[in-house]
Image (cartoon, rainbow, N blue to C red):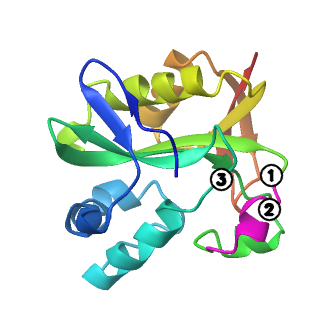
Amino acid sequence: MPATLTTDRLVLRTFREDDATALFDMHSREEVQRWIGDGQVMTDPAEAVSSIARRRMEFPEPMGIWAIDLEDRLVGTLLLKPIPISGTPLSADPRTTDLDHALSSPDVEIGWHLHPDAWGRSIATEAATRVLEHAVALTRIVAVTHPDNHASQRVALRLGMADVGTTERYYDTTTRLFVLER
């Protein structure tokens, strides 16, 4: 399980079974899902329940997938994990819980998904900054966004990531790529 991390106002923690309702609320919203994967919303609460197993996968330190709590309420997800390279089994099924596939990528991705109630409050930047501090040993980290997701692109830039343009290297789709070299 990932280490519990804190900031002045956030707790980044391991996902729990009782997070399913909040996850379903977040990922059943078109305004959230339009930027994630194929854009399909969750339509069945059981999808949220099954997603918790993926979110609890054990990655090598300092990687992980964290629940973001604000005032004891789940408001999002922060991930630091191997990113699926286009054309690989992981890219074909990024929802896999097969750890061998999940660790097969040579690149590490940082990403965030937030409930709309948490947008515009610098929560993604704060959570990602804390995880990057935790992962100081990683020398190269990437972030990818939907080409039209300007809000997430601003977060990547605030994190000090360089915008290197569009790419088709990840997730079998065109994304905007940001890179942090340290």
Query: Amino acid under label 2?
Result: Ser
Distance from disc 2 to disc 1, alpha carbons, whole Å, reads 5 Å
Disc 1 marks which residue? 169
- Residue 98 falls inside the magenta stretch: yes
Specify start and end residues of the magenta stretch as a single range: 97-105
Give whichever of 160, 4 is nearer the camera. 4
Residue 76 is situated, as x and y percent measured from the top left of the image, at: 33, 47
Image quadrant of residue 142? Answer: top right
Please state if 120 lies on the left or on the right of 139 as rendered: left
Query: Amino acid under label 1?
Result: Arg
Disc 3 marks which residue? 59
Image quadrant of residue 147? Answer: top right
- Residue 10 falls inside the magenta stretch: no
Q: What element carries label 1?
A: loop
- Residue 54 appears anywhere in the view: yes
Reply above or below: 37 against 142. below
Badge 3: residue crowd in 10 Å (few <14, some 14–19, many ≥20): some
Please state if 117 lies on the left or on the right of 62 as rendered: left
State the residue at coordinates (31%, 84%): 46
Q: Earlier in the sequence, mark 2 or mark 1?
A: 2
Reply above or below: 54 against 155. below
**Tag 3 and tag 1, C-beta contact below 8 Å:** no
Distance from disc 3 to disc 1, alpha carbons, whole Å, reads 22 Å
Residue 60 is situated, as x and y percent measured from the top left of the image, at: 70, 48
